[in-house]
Amino acid sequence: MNKSPLHSEFLEALGESVLIWDGAFGTQVQNRELPLADYGLDNAPDTLAVQSVRGRLGDTPLEGCTEILNLTRPDVMTEIHESYLAAGSDIIETNSFGATSIVMAEYDAPELVADIARAAGDIAVAAAKKFSESTGRRRFVAGGLGPGTKLVTLGQTTWEALENTYTEAFIQLIASGVDVLLLETLQDLLMVKAGLVSARRAMAETGQRLPIIVQVTMEQTGTMLLGSEIGAALNLAECFPEVVAFGMNCATGPVEMAEHARFLGANSTRPLSIQPNAGLPMMEKGHAVYKLTPEELADHHDRFISEFGAALVGGCCGTTPHHIEAVVAKCGGRNHNAPAHWQGVRNLFSGFDFEIRTPEQGQTKALQGASSLYQFVPYQQDNSFLIVGERTNANGSKAFREMLAAENWDGLVEMARDTEAEGSHLLDVCTAYVGRDEARDMTTLLRLYNQHVTVPIMIDSTEVPVVEAALKHLAGKPIINSINFEDGEERTRRVLELCQTYGAAVVALTINEQGMAKSVEDKVAIAERILALTREYGLPDHDVFFDCLTFTLGSGDEEFRKSAIATINAIRILKERYPAINTILGVSNVSFGLKASSRMALNSVFLHYAQEAGLDAAIVHFSKIRPESQISDEIWKVASDLVFDRREYAMSV
């Protein structure tokens, strides 16, 4: 994609003041009580797609399909857009919420996606242009797509189907001239990821770059529909620099959104966008009625702006042009009180030649961690290191291998849940097993882990296609294990491209073309060479975990007697030079070949001293790690003598 600077009037305006969205579209259509004939195709343009659907459906109307009205009643669509623009909206959304083949297939008309999306964009862009010219104030259009009707995490559709249809719709919205792309009312984090990948693909295919806004839906339960916390959603979205605003819409009213807005105001590095319903619906005479008044919505938005720094505010279900008029009167043109941790759009998407100006005060910062479908897990643990469970790895667990060979998927899920229950913050998952299809096993297992395991996943594979397949099955932000320079830079670059494309952190091993680094100097030099590449691909330093490699101390091999010292010192140097990076070790390698009791002691002691040097994370069987207080002084001394090669005092373990 072209990387030359572009100018975005939309983000320039966002940098100046609060921008006001429009309100509900579907309820405005319903209020007009259009005749059923308007949902037929008699008045639609005579395109090949329309001819195809007519040939199949005849005169049957697409009852309830609001999107078809872009083709059959563009005058009504224009009227609704203009009613919000007249109320003072800065941004209107295209009537393309369900413009995907997944939704349109329910009307037996999937081939209409491109026609509908293009018509929706053309209608909204024309309305915005008219008001921009007549009022002398620039109005903007968001080309929006909703979540569809099938959840990819639950296997109701596939990643490929989502990516292809969202790309098709976004291409047409971009071609119509929209100012920003919008993914809204999202209920599934895997859908968030697929939608963002699709938006990027559409921009690559059209050669145009636009900012993206993401809005998820938080239910009355306090989570998204599938149980995702707001932090998990934010953590994923912030992997994508094109996402220039993040927030919520639909499901609840502003009261129920307040605590989520507070969290985003304190943690998001992107401007906050909020579009609540007009309160929770109440059933009256068989119909949902929204009771929140325009003045009440305006008061809530006033609070969101002043307390949480909201920068884009508007309405969803039940809101009307009167609601938006009240919001404009109270909040329009206001300074958005941007929190200091907004990093500025120049830093978020450097292809644009502008930035949002932010105040210097404030102490909050971006979330730094991994996430699953359900929760965000910070890299820095207050009372522990980041524990990565190693039992779900075919290379290190006999029980895992046996269950994998038997395709005992239920047993493998139970093993993962047990490892999580032991205290692991992440799970290292490897399905590489001689004679088996690694990609098939990985995707089958991760489809289950994505739904049934709460903690994030570390994808452990040397095969790039396996890593990419895995990333399409994990809803949150995982960590890829690993990259190195054993075969040069090509594979490392390919993995970093995947991190960039799908949103992931990475483990980097200190290995180069000459093999595994043994000296402190070589470990540090290779790490710095890798760091230059990760920065080239846009990964923040905190998303890079350096593994300075651990060699066994139990073999008696003279070459490795000082290997633990080298590892510990390399960790210390890297943390001093690059404090934002993370360090990780596969701790059990240090004790390979010893008896179980000796392994427990040596692993625990080595981990203790590595932590003192700055180790952030470790791949371990956590239930077999003991604190110093639970190991006798004599055993602790023997193990530490081995770690630091203090031979004059050494004893046999």
Image (spheres, grey):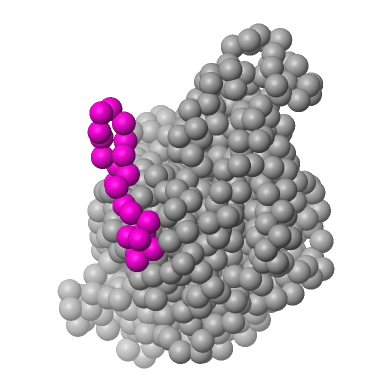
Q: Which residues are magenta?
A: 280-300
Would you say residue 622 sits in the magenta stretch?
no
Where residue 68 sits in the image (x, y, percent)?
61, 28
228 left or right of 153 in image: left
| Residue 369 as seen in the image, left or right of residue 463 | left
Residue 647 appears in the figure:
no
Q: Is residue 255 visible?
A: yes
User: Picture coordinates of residue 216 (x, y %)?
Assistant: 45, 51
| Frontmost residue, 644 versus 58 | 58
**Residue at image location 33% in from the left, 54% down from the top:** 293
Q: Quadrant of residue 240?
A: bottom right
**In this picture, is 572 found above or below 95?**
below
Q: Position of residue 404 (x, y in %)?
A: 43, 36
Instruction: Tell me if residue 351 comes above or below residue 519 in the rendering.
Output: above
Residue drawn at x 45%, y 48% as measured from the top left: 320
Which residue is at 71% across, 37% downward?
119
Quarter of the image containing the C terminus? bottom left
User: For the N terminus, which image quadrant?
Assistant: bottom right
In terms of depth relative to the viewer, which is nearer, 504 or 324? 324
Please say whether residue 296 is one of the residues in the magenta stretch: yes
Where does residue 528 sit, x and y in percent of width and height?
65, 79
